[in-house]
Amino acid sequence: MLDLIAQLPQESFDRPHIDWHALSPELVLLGVGALVTILDIVFLERARNWTSAIAGLGLLATVVPLLTLWVSVDDEGPRVLFGGAYVVDKYALVMKLIFILAGYVVVLLSTNYIAEGDYWENEYYGLLLSSIMGMVVMASARDLISIFIALELLSIPAYMLAAWRKRDTKGNEAGLKYYLMGVFASAIMLYGMSLLYGVTGSTLLRDIADAVVSREQFDSAIALGIVLVIVGFAFKISAVPFQHWAPDTYEGAPTPIAAFLAVASKAAGFVALMNVLFVAFPGRHDIYQPLIWVMAAASMTVGNLIALRQTNIIRMLAYSGVAQTGFMLAPLAVAGDPEVADLALSTTVNYLAIYAAMNLGAFAVVIALARKTGSGEIDAMKGSFQYAPGLTVAMSVFLFSLAGIPPIGGWFAKFNVFRSLAAAETVWAYVLAVIVAVNSVVALYYYASVARKMMADDAPDGDVSPVHVPPSLVAALTITVIVTLVFGFFPGTVGEFTDVSLVAAP
């Protein structure tokens, strides 16, 4: 055995080169998570007063290396690590920034909610940071193994956070449903990945891209592998018909975690989906485009129709999220055309950024009003303009932005969807554009209905005493309102940061 080892070339024992600057956001986030864990071990319950602030400041500190990397990538081009399995380019940096800022807003939403409830607080922020870490890794993953590891790193803490209300039956149901459906989705996705690896002999997405086009004798296995991988990610983004876990999970989970799953977790699923579509399967759009088309049309239609009948605001936002998934999938249904691919990618990234702001803002208003009403029912929010005019106006901004009404941010997101579909210049793209237009009108009905009840109706119990909104919630609302309005009033300027192309490793 020693003789065999001695015959190995010296390169086998050399430490691989690691670009520490490229990994600096992940290292900062890892350090913050370790600090929260150490404080919890050393100071126990005395650390409760610090963990929220440390988690928030740590997420903001992670933005610094993201900005330095942006300058570096702009000057020198993408940074490629581990033989192409990990790539840091502008696309990855934009998505990492979305995850970090969305996580920071969730920390603001959680500060008083968790502190005032019967929750374990230190572990909460540790798990939240771990899940965000998985999302940040996902943005750069260009390998089936790294994608799966990132997916599990973000999912496993999320399973526990969804069931954080341990003494509540709905909380237990939320965690159990999310866990069982998540494990089922992971198993399906792993089976698809194993088929692709068996056919191509590689886990690198760039190698898979070459092999799935050239190996026609394994066409059925390749087709099944692509479909199963896409189905696995469809569970994560709650696309129809794989959305059944979302409403019950959102309703039973702590409201900040419902916001986290609705925005950051969904965005991470989209990142993984876009990575495989644009890097691994660009030559097999004949397989994935029809599937994406059907899921997009079904998601926006089913989500909107069920949202019309909801009486609980969390469940309405859950089904609204299903519909929004359909809108975000629509550009990917025409992404197989090389002339449209970059526009389709930028459109979905742009939509994810705007969706994160307006949806987190809507959940922030729900949390603030629930401090007075103690209910998540839409009728309990009636007449909120009489005692919380600022919150009501903010909620109206978010709702009409979700509906795509100019000049609020959502209109720019939907406009880009129409633009990408029109650029494809195919019959099926035009049909999907019509479906998007019809569903936008349907969505406006229930969004406007909630805004009308809050603005025009009387408070159900006649109590018009003001709502006390903690500073952390005020900060979250300020950030989300500003971002939503800036995207609407200055779409060209802000849109430059989401105008990206996914560069495969050389």
Image: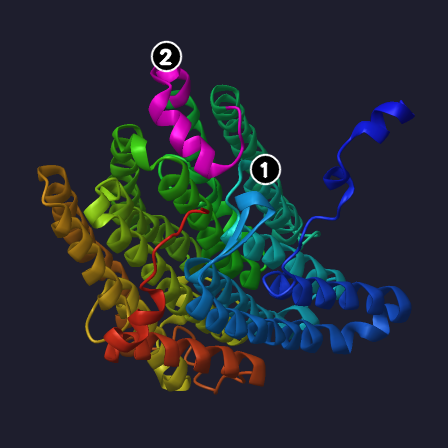
Q: Main secondary structure of the magenta part?
A: helix
Highlighted range, magenta: 201-222
> Is residue 442 toward the left or the right of residue 209 in the image?
left
Q: Label 2: few (<14), some or many (≥20) within 10 Å?
A: few
Mark 1, secondary structure of its residue: helix
Q: Which residue is mark 1?
A: 145
- Residue type marked 2: Gln
Residue toward you, 243 or 502? 502
454 and 53: which one is in front?
53
Residue 242, how many percent across, how many down? 41, 36
Query: Looking at the image, which residue is at 62% across and 46% down?
Result: 159
Residue 384 seen in the figure: no
From the viewer's side, name the closer residue of 118 and 24.
Answer: 24
Q: What's the CA distance linking mark 1 and mark 2? A: 25 Å
Secondary element at tag 2: helix
Q: Which residue is mark 2?
A: 217
Q: Is residue 466 visible?
A: yes
Q: Is residue 487 above or below residue 123?
A: below
Residue 360 in the image: state x and y as whole percent: 45, 67
Q: Is residue 39 left or right of residue 211?
A: right
Q: Marks 1 and 2: which is nearer the front?
A: 2
Amino acid type, residue under disc 1 in the picture: Ile
Residue at the extreme top of the image, as rendered: 217
Task: Please state the horizontal and vertical placement of residue 478, each as a whole percent of the image.
Answer: 44, 82
Quarter assignment of residue 298: top left
Residue situated in front as seen by the camera: 416 or 243: 416
Return the disc, 1 or 2, that comes first in the chain's sequence: 1
Magenta stretch encompasses residue 331:
no
Q: Please rate how many residues cluster around mark 1, counting C-alpha atoms within 10 Å: few if below 14, some from 14 to 19, many from 20.
A: some
